[in-house]
Image (spheres, rainbow, N blue to C red):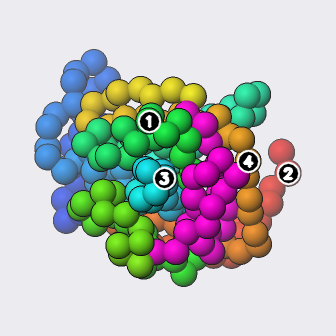
Amino acid sequence: MICVAHTSAPILLRTDHGNAPVDHGDGFRLAARCLASSVAVVSVNDGGKVLAKTVSSFTTVSLLPQLVSVWVGSRSPIAHAAAMADVFSVSILEAGQEDISIALSEPGSGSRGTAAIGIATTAVPSGAVAISGCLSWFDCRVHDLVEGGDHTLLIGQVTATGRREGSPLLYHDGRYRTLGTPAPQRRT
């Protein structure tokens, strides 16, 4: 039996390893909230209009070749624009950039353009853009697009990166967070 904490009563997700999950509506979302993640923004230059969306599913995939991946909603214009432009960027937000994350997570924000909602961007070598003041960015050429349920996986081959010193903006259990005191290192 797997249970989810932080609720008034545990939600049973699976009764045994052989049965399909029991549908309890928000059980999946509550379990997913236990995953702490960096806050990233995927951006595409769509004919001079910068489309951007906050994502929490950014992952480095491979070192040879250098690949990253990010999931975007299938209905978002970003996946289509990235396929047409053949380039996109991912910006890792810095602690203190919650306002940018919130603005770019609103419904419809992915199609309005960053200029329309007052978010500054900086050009990266491919012609894509990164969020100004971000902690780091990955400039990518589209390597593959994969449909998965109600989302599209953008896999990008990294062509350039940038970074600066600072702390990442994190998201855990429905709240923005920052790094705390590092755990003591243990020797193995």
Q: Is residue 26 magenta?
A: no
Q: Earlier in the sequence, mark 1 or mark 4?
A: 1
Q: Nearer the viewer, mark 2 or mark 3?
A: 3
Number of the label disc, if any, that sits on residue 107: none
Work out whether 26 lies above or below 67: below
> Mark 4 or mark 2: which is in front?
4
From the image, which quarter does the C terminus lie in? top right
Lower position in the chain sequence, tag 2 or tag 1: 1
Q: Which mark is residue 45?
A: 3
- Cα separation, mark 1 vs mark 4, equals 20 Å
Mark 4, residue position: 160
Q: Nearer the viewer, residue 136 or 140?
A: 140
Q: Which residue in the protein does label 1 denote?
A: 84
At mark 3, the secondary structure is strand
Seen as rendered, the residue at the extreme front is 47
**Mark number displayed over residue 187:** 2
Looking at marks 3 and 1 on the same chain, the residue that comes earlier in the sequence is marked by: 3
Q: Quadrant of the N terminus?
A: top left
- Which amino acid type corresponds to the residue marked 1 in the rendered image? Met
Q: Could you tell me the amino acid type at mark 3?
A: Asn
Q: Please report whichever mark, 4 or 3, sits nearer to the chain's N-terminal start.
A: 3
User: Marks 2 and 1, how far apart in space?
Assistant: 49 Å
Picture residue at 55% right of the left edge, 69% below the top: 121
**Residue 87 relative to residue 161: left or right:** left
Q: Residue at x 44, y 36 (%)?
A: 84
Which of the two residues, 59 or 106, is positioned nearer the viewer here? 106
Q: State the CA–CA distance, disc 4 to disc 2.
A: 35 Å
What amino acid type should be assigned to the residue bearing mark 2?
Answer: Arg
Magenta range is 119-142
